[in-house]
Image (cartoon, helix red, strand yellow):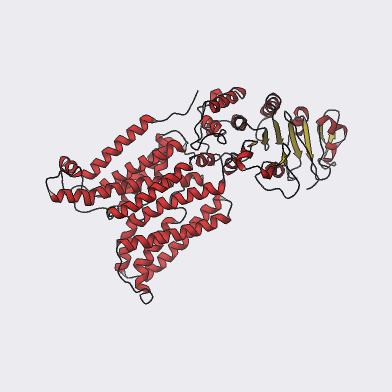
């Protein structure tokens, strides 16, 4: 009598939906290209050069970015919620997003303030990505150093939030002294964007995501044991410190690389694990990890499809769309269930 | 606290009793390797506890703690299956042997009606039985329980303690628990350790009564022990 369902039907359905969302996302955009033409371009038999260019250099990287960002942030959200045993935890609780903001803010706004110290005054997407990854890894490593000293995971959560407050304060001081145009550039970065990634940058994010997923998979057993609490996990022979490191590093790689290239994208990491738990009635991470990856990717593709306002030239900030369309869904799910138990 | 010495054999149910704050839980946590010992020796089968690896300890000692489990969203079966973690592969896949051990414990603790329920749907007594089953499923020689009968009514307290006794005797395990239910423990346990900070007597309950060890447990101007009935009396 084995009571552990494999949810194969759910997964097949999710993968089909994912594929559909992927195709819809690629087919819709500011330039109207028919479905047939888009598919032709995808398989390299496009009749027009411009179609081929739009699909391969713009839409395809953006769709793949959406999949990586959605899946990666959702997975790191799941990891943090289990590690901290707190339904409010998300990928950014360890200060990853605030660190990235600090890096970006220093580059965009700080350079004009300290122009005597820093010799370069221009920046582009690459330097911005480097600055924000440096920022997030700086804050994350500070948190890791502290993590080695504190035994209590809950204290770690508070410390992560405190680091977030400190960096947010520095950013607001910087913005106070900045010129309006610099401030605007920073605000644009903080909106998040899926569309600016080159294939090379995409490769870096993909690599970090794969390593993050790998670390999560080898942490499946500790993650499941953490559902009982740390003491029970220890009594089951789980090496607490090592497992904690693996989970934190996985989150850092996933959320850090994504934030560096796509900006701080809110909401997805916090919400998708909750949505997934409504679909899959199990706490087993063997099921939950692939499930949040699929659900996150689908949600992000849908949000991106809406954000690019098919048929028009304007693009809405992705960060706003994820929250405007996602938050009511989560509220509805939870109100319907009335009770949320972690 | 010093001068504690005791030894338990397979198939024995033993209780640690004592006044609040005397260190019952601390002792149990030290025995369970949750915190390092300050001095002295703890041995399992003649070998010092600290020489075992964490995974080896996981196959020697299982625990039922007072702290609530972190995720009440676990289904009963999922929770029970976690007891097999020290033996499963890197993905935690249950082998046929694991499943038969789980089913065996489900039968012993009569948990069949609850298997698909989530932990938050269970009463305190049911959840305690599930946690005991999980410890049993971990298949260790020693089970440590920290106050397994708190929050339960008299009937369920007796039910849990009788269950522990029959498990200890039938499966030949060492079961050690802390408790404030001294009168119940006297009736059911094979051995008892009385932590009073001085003698810390350890013996069979009836011997402890003969030696008047229970009299020193609480301040005598408030509570005294009646050796004839094996119960405590309030001094008016």
Q: Give the quadrant of residue B230.
A: top right
Residue B65 makes an appearance in the image: no
Horizontally, residue B235 falls left or right of residue B116, namely right
Horizontally, residue A312 falls left or right of residue B171, namely left
Frontmost residue, A175 versus B164? B164
Residue B138, relative to residue A202: is it above or below? above
What residue is shown at x 47% (from left), y 45% (from top)? Answer: A81
Q: Residue furthest right?
A: B211
Q: Residue furthest bottom?
A: A116
Rendering coords of residue A181 (x, y %)? 29, 68
Horizontally, residue A2 falls left or right of residue B226, namely left
Residue A306, relative to residue A198: is it above or below? above
What residue is shown at x 47% (from left), y 57% (from top)? Answer: A140
Rendering coords of residue B20 (x, y %)? 73, 43
Rendering coords of residue B106 (x, y %)? 58, 25
What residue is shown at x 62% (from left), y 33% (from top)? Answer: B135
Q: Give the quadrant of residue A333.
A: top left
Number of residue marks:
0
Rendering coords of residue A302 (x, y %)? 29, 43
Frontmost residue, B19 versus A331? B19
Horizontally, residue A206 falls left or right of residue A341, namely left
Residue A81 makes an appearance in the image: yes
Frontmost residue, A336 versus B134? B134
Residue A246, relative to residue A227: is it above or below? below
């Amino acid at each position: 009598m084995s009571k552990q369902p494999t949810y194969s039907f759910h997964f097949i359905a999710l993968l089909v939906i994912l594929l559909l969302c992927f195709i819809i996302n690629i087919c819709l955009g500011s330039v109207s290209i028919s479905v047939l033409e888009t598919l032709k371009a995808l398989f390299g038999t496009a009749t027009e050069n411009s179609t081929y260019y739009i699909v391969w250099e713009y839409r395809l990287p953006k769709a793949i970015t959406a999949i990586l960002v959605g899946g990666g942030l959702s997975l790191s959200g799941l990891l943090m919620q289990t590690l901290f045993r707190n339904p409010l935890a998300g990928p950014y609780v360890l200060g990853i997003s605030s660190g990235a903001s600090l890096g970006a803010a220093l580059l965009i706004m700080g350079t004009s303030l300290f122009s005597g110290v820093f010799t370069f005054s221009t920046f582009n997407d690459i330097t911005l990505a480097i600055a924000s990854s440096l920022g997030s890894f700086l804050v994350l490593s500070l948190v890791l150093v502290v993590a080695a000293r504190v035994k209590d995971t809950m204290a770690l959560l508070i410390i992560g939030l405190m680091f977030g407050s400190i960096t947010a304060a520095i950013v607001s001081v910087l913005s106070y002294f900045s010129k309006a145009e610099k401030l605007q550039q920073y605000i644009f970065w903080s909106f998040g964007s899926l569309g600016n990634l080159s294939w090379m940058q995409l490769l870096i994010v993909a690599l970090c995501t794969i390593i993050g997923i790998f670390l999560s998979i080898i942490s499946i057993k500790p993650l499941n044991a953490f559902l009982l609490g740390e003491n029970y996990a220890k009594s089951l022979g789980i090496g607490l410190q090592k497992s904690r490191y693996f989970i934190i590093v996985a989150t850092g790689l996933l959320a850090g690389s994504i934030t560096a290239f796509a900006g701080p994208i809110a909401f997805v990491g916090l919400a998708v694990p909750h949505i997934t738990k409504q679909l899959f009635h199990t706490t087993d991470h063997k099921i939950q990890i692939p499930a949040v990856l699929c659900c996150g990717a689908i949600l992000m593709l849908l949000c991106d499809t809406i954000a690019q306002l098919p048929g028009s030239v304007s693009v809405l900030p992705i960060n706003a769309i994820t929250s405007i369309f996602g938050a009511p869904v989560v509220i509805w799910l939870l109100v319907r269930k009335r009770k949320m138990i972690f | 606290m010093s001068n504690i010495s005791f030894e338990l054999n397979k198939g024995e149910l033993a209780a640690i009793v004592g006044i609040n704050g005397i260190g019952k839980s601390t002792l149990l946590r030290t025995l369970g390797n949750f915190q390092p010992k300050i001095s002295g020796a703890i041995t399992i089968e003649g070998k010092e506890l600290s020489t075992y690896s964490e995974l080896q300890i996981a196959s020697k000692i299982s625990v039922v703690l007072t702290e609530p489990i972190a995720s009440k969203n676990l289904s009963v079966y999922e929770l029970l299956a976690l007891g097999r973690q020290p033996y499963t592969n890197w993905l935690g896949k249950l082998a046929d042997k694991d499943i038969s051990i789980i089913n065996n414990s489900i039968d012993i603790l009569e948990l069949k009606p609850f298997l698909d329920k989530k932990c938050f749907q269970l009463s305190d007594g049911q959840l305690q039985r599930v946690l005991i089953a999980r410890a049993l499923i971990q298949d260790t020689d020693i089970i440590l329980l920290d106050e397994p009968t708190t929050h339960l009514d008299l009937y369920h307290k007796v039910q849990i303690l009788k269950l522990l006794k029959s498990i200890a005797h039938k499966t030949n395990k060492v079961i050690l628990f802390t408790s404030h239910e001294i009168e119940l423990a006297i009736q059911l346990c094979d051995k008892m350790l009385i932590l009073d900070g001085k003698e810390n007597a350890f013996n069979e309950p009836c011997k402890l009564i003969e030696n008047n060890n229970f009299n020193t447990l609480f301040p005598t101007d408030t509570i005294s022990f009646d050796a004839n009935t094996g119960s405590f009396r309030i001094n008016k």
